[in-house]
Amino acid sequence: MTEDSPEEAARKLFAGACDFVWGSTTAENLPPEKLNEVAFVGRSNAGKSSLVNALTGRKALARVSQTPGATRQINFFNLADRLMLVDLPGYGFAKRSKTESEAWQEMIFSYLRRRSRLRRVLVLIDARRGVMDSDEMVMKLLDQTAVSYGLVLTKGDELKSSQQADALEKAGAAAAKHTAALQEVQLTSSLKGEGIPALRVHLAAFSQ
């Protein structure tokens, strides 16, 4: 019996059962750490929920909204009892009150600092906009907490090939300035599936 390729093994993992198991509205209400975790973080409406849905081949696992800031809690999804996918609230939404914005960001930051089984953070960047000041702020925090992270460009289908190459180059230059950032930047499209198989392989390496 031949062994599956990494791509096929990752596809099977992400095609398995994936269930919402916990929602935290404060950093004090996080679930026990039973599995390795990978977290998705990004600006409001950067496409976090859409990416989680695309990775797992589902249409409504993670809530998708046209309204920035719709994800108001940290959502935990158990992937086949082998990996925990963590969808974090968006940051940088200008219309949110300062007090509310600071409280939400502190919740995100507390999660990043406290989880001993957090293996990777994906910082999602809208490919059309590139790395913005609020993204840099989160990247600096991740550097300080020594959490390894990679930049993932989303909505790549909305750019032409030449624009995709330019976006990757600029994001790579931004990542190179940060000590905890991976040098490889990944380009994805949740709509067309571009980059999704490679990202599954990357994350499957942390499964148990």
Image: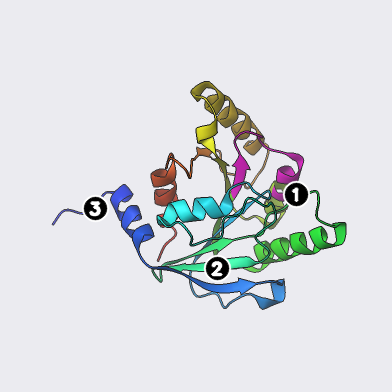
Give the quadrant of the N terminus.
bottom left
Task: Name the residue: 49% across, 24% down.
Answer: 161
Towards the viewer: 6 or 58: 58
**Percent from the top left, x then y, of residue 180?**
63, 48
Quadrant of residue 105 within the rendered picture: bottom right
In three-dimensional space, the C-alpha distance between marks 2 and 3, rounded to whole angstroms, equals: 28 Å
**Percent from the top left, x then y, of residue 157?**
50, 34
- Dot 1, how many residues are within 10 Å of its Cα: few (below 14), some (14-19), or many (20+)? many
In three-dimensional space, the C-alpha distance between marks 1 and 3, rounded to whole angstroms, equals: 41 Å
Task: Name the residue: 27% across, 49% down.
Answer: 5
154 lies above or below 72? above
- Dot 2, how many residues are within 10 Å of its Cα: few (below 14), some (14-19), or many (20+)? many
Per the image, label 1 sits on a secondary structure element best described as loop
The kind of residue on which mark 2 rests is Phe
The kind of residue on which mark 3 rests is Asp
Cβ atoms under marks 2 and 3 closer than 8 Å? no
Residue where numbered disc 1 is placed: 92
154 lies above or below 79? above
- Give the colour scheme of this rendering: rainbow
Residue 151 among magenta residues: no
Task: Name the residue: 65% across, 72% down.
Answer: 24
Per the image, label 2 sits on a secondary structure element best described as strand
**Percent from the top left, x then y, of residue 199?**
44, 47
Residue where numbered disc 3 is placed: 4
In three-dimensional space, the C-alpha distance between marks 2 and 1, rounded to whole angstroms, equals: 22 Å
Residue where numbered disc 2 is placed: 76
Give the foreground label among 1 and 3.
1
- Dot 3, how many residues are within 10 Å of its Cα: few (below 14), some (14-19), or many (20+)? few
Q: Which residues are magenta?
A: 123-138
